[in-house]
Image (tube, rainbow, N blue to C red):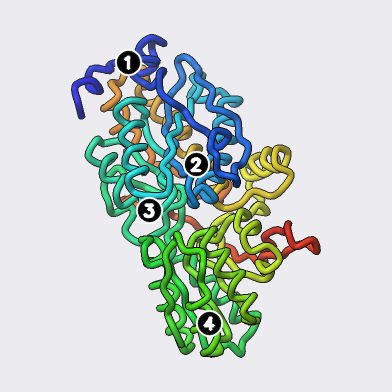
Amino acid sequence: MNNAIAQTTALLSTCALLLTGCGGGSVTNSPDNTTNNTTTNTAQTTTTPGAIPIGIALAQTSNVALLGQEGFVGARIAEKYFNSKGGINGTPIKLVSQDTGGDEAGAINAFQTLINKDKVVGIVGPTLSQQAFSADPIAERAKVPVIGASNTANGIPEIGDYVARVSAPVSIVAPNSLKAALKQNPQIKKVAVFYAQNDAFNKSETEIFQKAVKEQGLELVTVQKFQTTDTDFQAQATNAINLKPDLVIISGLAADGGNLVRQLRELGYKGIIVGGNGLNTPNVLSVCKALCDGVLIAQAYSPEYPGEINKVFRQAYVEQYKKEPAQFTGQAFAAVQVYVEALKELDKKNKISTLPIDKLRTELNKQILAGKYNTPLGEIAFTPVGDVIQKEFYVAQIKMDKDGNTGKFVFIK
């Protein structure tokens, strides 16, 4: 920890120290500022004197913005809600956001800025597991807590003592969609798998899917590779269709995965398609449109979960966006909630306004791992290594409207 941070001896007691040490002059971004044409409207971060800064490092630009922007929405709703309830025992929180873009360099730069310039107490992010493997070690070395809200690849919490996640690992979630496909069509025998080979999460996810396929006694007829930046999948799709699969499984992101779904259908594939977690966003609907219909995707969040905090979150989201919230939005809300509740508990034990920022970060990390939280995801806690403990999981199927442009995720029993 550098001397500038060590000398920040009172995070909250004076506004002058907070504005100097906690990013009063930082550049805060929101999806409103991005030129990406899939931008979701969200409110700007409000700079509140004396507020506790929490970093949000998610993608606002690049093809990854289809996922990152949903996270921003959830985080903003959490910020507004918890501040309306008094914040941290009377002190508000302030989200300080940095755009990670879609690559490792962007995530590293965002983390470095949030830690060294904005002086946040902790970070939510980054968007991709691929980015986490590069950026999380930056926070680990600085002893700054990180909560991943959309990082599900194997090995994320093991990056370090300061790395946790509220996003359930793919090894738990992914096989549920395969089981749902077999329930819909017990005659499935042959399976074709597609995955983005340049992304750590998708490589991890496809291994889980392929293992589950074999455990179900199914024949894996082909494994087709692509890049997350690809737009043309004609060759891979044709190769797979020629082998007459009954089921296709795709591990990609929203833009590439959606285009692959569309091209498979255009080339005549009529069987069930299972999408991985990267397709788990309503933003994919604008990519494959009517041809998205029927895709199965496992879920770690349901708008229908009956918990009180989920009712509040769901109502706030529906009122603002006129549609149901998606998984990444709920997970980002939960990540901010964990910070808020951990800070409140820590403040009861030892007033956080009296703690130097390095001490605050360390004690906050301990409190995060020790707590239990009733979130929109259900009740969650953390293993000693920082992995989420979660009980509730689901599978949804995309149902497109007659216009072919709009649709929704329908949860199946």
> Disc 4 to disc 3, how far (Cα)?
39 Å
* Amino acid type of the residue that numbered disc 1 sits on in the rendered structure: Ala
> Disc 3 to disc 2, how far (Cα)?
26 Å
Q: In which quadrant is the C terminus drawn?
A: bottom right
Badge number at residue 387:
3
Q: Earlier in the sequence, mark 3 or mark 2?
A: 2
Tell me the SS state at disc 4.
helix
Q: Position of residue 390 (x, y in %)?
A: 48, 56
Label 2 vs label 1, nearer the camera: 2
Q: Which residue shows up at 45% across the image and 78% down it?
A: 212
Please tell me how crowded label 3 is: few (under 14), some (14-19), or many (20+) other residues with Cα within 10 Å.
many
User: Which residue is identified by label 2?
Assistant: 60
> Disc 4 to disc 1, how far (Cα)?
62 Å
Q: Is residue 374 visible?
A: no
Judge by depth and name the residue closer to the eye, 182 or 41.
Answer: 41
User: Which residue is identified by label 1?
Assistant: 10
* Amino acid type of the residue that numbered disc 3 sits on in the rendered structure: Asp
Please tell me how crowded label 1 is: few (under 14), some (14-19), or many (20+) other residues with Cα within 10 Å.
some
* Amino acid type of the residue that numbered disc 4 sits on in the rendered structure: Thr
Tell me the SS state at disc 1.
loop
User: Which residue is identified by label 4?
Assistant: 238
Label 2 vs label 4, nearer the camera: 4
Judge by depth and name the residue closer to the eye, 364 or 8.
Answer: 8
Q: Which residue shows up at 55% across the image and 39% down it?
A: 35
